[in-house]
Amino acid sequence: MPTLTVQNLPGGPINVQPGQTLLRALHEAGHDWMHACGGRGRCTTCRIELLSGADCLAPPTAHELRYLTTGRLAATARLTCQAQLPEGEVVGRVPEATKLPHVQYAE
């Protein structure tokens, strides 16, 4: 089963179901994750910094491409509300700018 590991969140790898977004998998695993637009791809607050496995993700969506081309999304980041993981493993981090004040993050 595809897995997502977020290095600065507690717990281990998160299973990602087929067709499921990373945001949905994070929420189902009990993690609170910033998503100001409600997961509709209209902002970049749900982004994840990718450390490895980016090639395992499905191609960027139109929403992500718009932010990539305007420079609002780094080439090493994806929107968790849009990104899907059909197979493999992705490792990432919660960016400093989108950390929630009530969540305990690891270094």
Image (cartoon, rainbow, N blue to C red):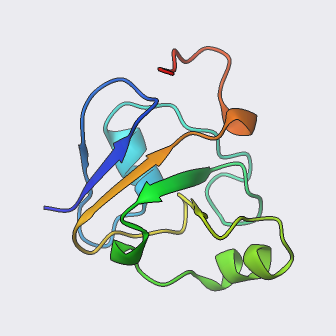
Which residue, as the protein is rendered here, is positioned at the far right? 70
In percent of the image, x 13 and y 61: which residue is there?
1
**Considering only vertical position in the picture, is 55 above or below 11?**
below
Q: Indicate left or right for 55 with 40 as reference.
A: left
Residue 68's place in the image compared with 104, above or below, is below
Image point 36% across, 23% down: which residue? 10
Left or right of 79? Residue 58 is: left
Q: Quadrant of residue 27?
A: top left
Total marks drawn? 0
Above or below residue 5? Residue 47 is below
Q: Position of residue 32 (x, y in %)?
A: 51, 31
- Please give the name of the residue rendered at 23% of the width and 62% of the height, measured from the top-left corner: 17
* Place of residue 87 in the rendered image (x, y in percent of width and height, measured from the top left): 22, 72
Residue drawn at x 26%, y 57% is 16
> Where 18 sits versus 96, above or below?
below
Q: Percent position (x, y) of residue 38? A: 65, 51
As rendered, which of 73 and 42 lies closer to the eye? Answer: 73
